[in-house]
Image (cartoon, rainbow, N blue to C red):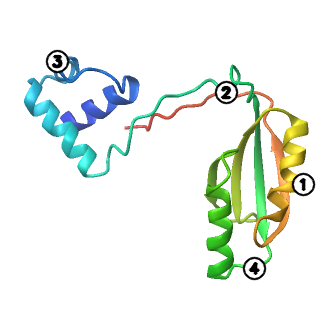
Amino acid sequence: MDPTDLKILRVLQEEPQIPVTELAQRVGLSHTPCWRRVKQLEQDGVISGRVVLLNADVLGLGINVFAKVKLKAHDESTLEEFEKAARDRPEIVDCFSMSGESDYMFRVVIESINSYEQFLKKVLLHFPGVITVNSHVALKCVKKTTKLPI
C-alpha cells in the first residue's frame, strides 16, 4: 500500500458514499486509476464493506453494557459454541476474545437496564460454558469512531 492508497482510505472513512470522480480529485488521480485502486483495495480485503451508521439513542437503544465473561472450560467445542451464540445475538454488537481475567468481553446495546437484566438472566447466563458475567453500564460515550488511525 502506498501513500495514495492511504489517502483514498482516509477519505473513504470520512465519506464512504463519495463519488469516484470527487474521490479521484481529492487524492490527485484521474477517475479510472482511482476506481481501479478502490476495487483493488476491496479485492485485497482492506475495504471490507461500507455501512450506514445508525443513531442508537434515536432508535431507543441508549444503553451500552460491557460484559466480561468467564467460561468453565476452554475446549474447542465450548469455545466454538460460545462464539456462535454470541454472533447469533443482535444485542451483542462487539465480542472480543480476551487475555487476562475474563475470557470474552461483549458490548451489548439495549433499550434499558431492565431489558439488560432480562437479557442477562434469560440469554447470557445460558450461553455454553458460562460461569460468570460481570457487567459494566456505560454512563456516557466520550468517543466512538469507526475510523482507523491510518
**Marks 4/2: CA–CA distance:** 35 Å
Q: Which mark is residue 25?
A: 3
Q: Amino acid at mark 1?
A: Lys
**Marks 3/2: CA–CA distance:** 34 Å
Q: Position of residue 145 (x, y in %)?
A: 54, 31
Looking at the image, which residue sits at the far bottom?
A: 75
Q: Amino acid at mark 2?
A: Ala
**Marks 4/3: CA–CA distance:** 55 Å
* Image quadrant containing the C terminus: top left
Question: Mark 2 falls on what kind of element?
Answer: loop
Residue 144: tell me if it is visible.
Answer: yes
Q: Which residue is mark 4?
A: 73
Q: Amino acid at mark 3?
A: Gln
Q: Position of residue 116 (x, y in %)?
A: 84, 43
**Marks 1/2: CA–CA distance:** 23 Å
In terms of depth relative to the viewer, which is nearer, 149 or 135?
135
- Whether tag 3 and tag 2 are in contact, CB under 8 A, the answer is no
Compare marks 4 and 3 and give the one earlier in the sequence: 3
Q: Position of residue 71 (x, y in %)?
A: 77, 71
Q: Which residue is mark 2?
A: 56
Q: Quadrant of residue 110?
A: top right
Q: Amino acid at mark 4?
A: Ala
Question: Mark 1 falls on what kind of element?
Answer: helix
In front of the other: label 4 or label 2? Answer: 2
- Looking at the image, is 71 positioned above or below residue 146? below
- Whether tag 3 and tag 1 are in contact, CB under 8 A, the answer is no
In front of the other: label 3 or label 1? Answer: 1
Compare marks 3 and 2 and give the one earlier in the sequence: 3
Q: Which residue is mark 1?
A: 121
Q: Quadrant of residue 18?
A: top left
Question: Mark 4 falls on what kind of element?
Answer: loop
